[in-house]
Image (spheres, rainbow, N blue to C red):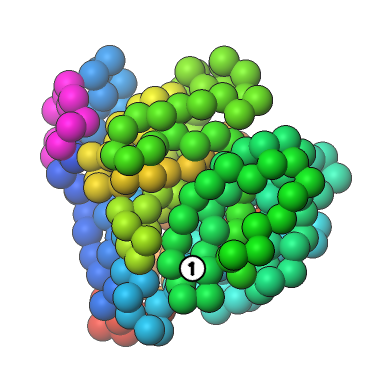
Amino acid sequence: MALGTVVSSLAQSPAPVKSCSLANSVMYKQYSFRDSANQPIKAYALTVDLRDPNTFIRPVGGSGCKKVSEYGAQSKAIAAVNAGFFDGNCKSVSFLKLNSVLKAFNSRERSVLGIDAQERLSIKRVPAGQGWPEVTNAVGGIPRIVTNGQVDVNSEGANEAFIKDRHPRTAVGLIDDQHAIIVMVEGRSPESKGMSLKAVAQFMISLGAQQAVNLDGGGSSALWIDPVFGDKDGVINRPSAGQERRVNSALAVYAPADADTTCF
């Protein structure tokens, strides 16, 4: 789709400008379009099929802060995005559970992506100070934005500007309990103005999401893909601050890479 094309409704997904298979179970797509306000948008999406026994998604980190590219490379993922929210001391303020070890509680009741021992995905609100024993890995966001295929933006304590203003965004959604979609939207630049949470929800629904939760965004938003696919440093987007921000956690995708694929 040419950048000059205006997408008046996201009931149907805009056509990707780039698409390639990172693995049999992982597809990468890049989008460039103008939204209904005629503003430029650049966005990226990973779809992940967890029915493949060699494919899985994991939150990583939780101790201090690192760049998303460091989390991805050091954990030998094929792709990774920033995940939970954190404070100025690099401590998570989002629910975080890694390999059955609870690393951080929600500071108030908020939505969390959970992954159980059978690699089934779900999203639910977890109260402050409580665990989620049914899942082995989990990372929290603010707030849930899609429920049963419909826009459902609840504040969960976020302020109005955070919800309604245009920002870089990162979000994760479920097509069903074994198919995930991870979206990263660039913002705060002439090339991409960013999205409100309602717009992110509409975009994710157009890509097939039935459930979705917003993750940390703004200057934290980053998408890294293993440089084996052709990008020299693996950071696919242009971070809004001009360079990667160090973050407390990332959401990483693992699968046998398609060694014959060059995407970039």
Q: Give residue 109's position: percent from left, percent from top.
A: 67, 37
Magenta-span inclusion, residue 162: no
Nearer the observer, 177 or 52: 177
Residue at disc 1, secondary structure: strand
Q: Which amino acid does label 1 sit on?
A: Ile
Seen at 37% across and 61% down, the residue is: 177
Residue 74 visible in the displayed image: yes
Nearer the observer, 155 or 148: 148
Q: Give residue 180's position: percent from left, percent from top.
A: 37, 59
Q: Give residue 171's position: percent from left, percent from top.
A: 46, 44
In what quadrant of the picture does the C terminus appear?
Answer: bottom left
Total marks shown come to: 1
Q: Give residue 209's position: percent from left, percent from top.
A: 31, 46
**In the image as oriented, which residue stretches furthest toward the front?**
134
Seen at 45% across and 61% down, the residue is: 121
Say which quarter of the image contains residue 134.
bottom right
Nearer the observer, 60 or 16: 60
**Relative horizontal placement of residue 230, taking residue 118 as reference (left or right):** left
Q: In this view, does 57 lie above or below 151?
A: below
Q: Mark 1 points at which residue?
A: 57
Seen at 31% across and 27% down, the residue is: 40
Magenta-span inclusion, residue 7: yes
Magenta residue span: 1-12
Seen at 22% across and 59% down, the residue is: 19
**In the image as oriented, which residue stretches furthest toward the right?**
89
Q: How crowded is mark 1: few (under 14 residues within 10 Å), some or many (20 or more)?
A: many
Residue 193 visible in the displayed image: no
In what quadrant of the picture does the N terminus appear?
Answer: top left
* Magenta stretch secondary structure, dominant: loop
**Relative horizontal placement of residue 102, taking residue 39 as reference (left or right):** right
